Amino acid sequence: MNILFRTDSSLQIGSGHVMRCLTLADELRQHGGDIMFVCRQHPGNMIGLIEGKGYQVVRLAQAETEYAVEPEDLAHAAWLGVAWQQDASDTITAVGDTKPEWLIVDHYALDRRWEEMLRPNVGKIMVIDDLADRPHDCDLLLDQNLYEGMETRYDNLVPKSCHKLLGPKNALLRPEFAAARKNLRKRDGQVKRVLVFLGGVDPTNETEKALQALAGINDRQFDVDVVVGGGNLHKEQINKICLENDGFHYHCQVDNMAELMAAADLAIGAGGATTWERCSLGLPSISVVIADNQYETTKAVEAAGATIHLGYSNKLKVEDLEKAIKHLINDYVHLNDMGAKSLAIRGCDLSLKNQNLVEAIIGDNSAKT
């Protein structure tokens, strides 16, 4: 079965869309899927990582000039780098005569108009979304996030026949998280290890802000694991800070995130897709919103008692982070309660990870309605 992914990464977009597509691609490849990606060559893209995992990538050219957003454009239209019509045409050219059975789209700058242009050239269309801010022409929709009223968010945005997979129980998690959860140690409320990961790109360098807060705790009795992506422009400075502080350990572009999360007692992280990775392993967290699309989900996770939500990164001070860290390392009851509530959010048996999704795509070669 031929399966085509259309997604992008960049300094502006970040790495999350590509990473969750790779998780799904790996799963589908194990079930016999023949996978190809179509990605535009934005600055800070992760095309090399995709190719390094053995996938063919059709590279769409970066625009020579910055795209001028029109009043009728989508909120994230600038992320595409070109007009949606141009992108659809480029993607159709990339598809050629293959006519993949599935087109999987994970891009905030694409909507029903783009999908309708691609429809004659593909079998079925799946959309991965978080925003519910635009209509789609799709057969299958995945939104893995926690929202108030999430069951009805897409009622007027997708065809009635569209099969919807909604909520954290459908989160795209790599197999390593299922393995780590089966062997998960019981945390005792003592903070001996803190994990810091604020996204693969982290363009505003929130990681350094977190490290300053942690370094400011003079009597700290914990180690710190600091994870950055290969595309992080500040990684050399972050590594330097780690070298200057005892117990700070620098990790770049890791493939053992589940291991690091399982070893941690507290995380400082962004409110994106790694939220569900943390929840799957019952890891208490302090969350920072670094993009608008993370706010509502992070607020919902806080309401469920699984994180401390410190709001938008551009308004966050080092002192605020330090205060939250000190509170949690001195309140083991709160910390343990957060861990239990994190596990409850993710809920389901991770050994059945993505089963409904894989069955919808591969199982009967059609999305169930």
Image (spheres, grey):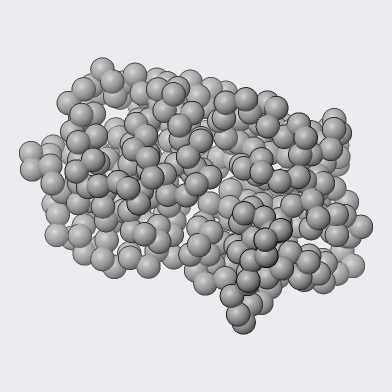
Number of marks in picture: 0
Relative placement, left or right, of 346 versus 40 is: left
Residue 289 falls left or right of residue 10: left
Towards the viewer: 236 or 26? 236
**Res 80 visible:** no
Q: Residue furthest front?
A: 71
In the drawing, does residue 336 fall left or right of residue 152?
Answer: left
Question: Within the image, what quadrant is residue 250 found in?
Answer: bottom left
Is residue 222 visible in this depiction of the protein? yes
- Classify 8 as above or below 184: below
Compared to 89, does 184 lie above or below?
Answer: above
- Determine the residue positioned at 31% across, 53% down: 207
Residue at the spot 19% in from the left edge and 43% down from the top edge: 319
The residue at 33%/65% (across/down) is 234
> Which quadrant of the structure image shows residue 322?
top left
| Residue placed most toward the observer, 325 or 124 | 325
Q: Outermost residue toward the left?
A: 219
Q: Position of residue 288 (x, y in %)?
A: 37, 43
Q: Is residue 318 above or below residue 73?
A: above
Residue 258, horizontal then vertical, whole percent: 43, 41
- In depth, the one of 359 and 122 nearer the eye is 122
Q: Which residue in the rendered view is the most extreme toward the right? A: 120
Which quadrant would the C terminus be assigned to in this image?
top right
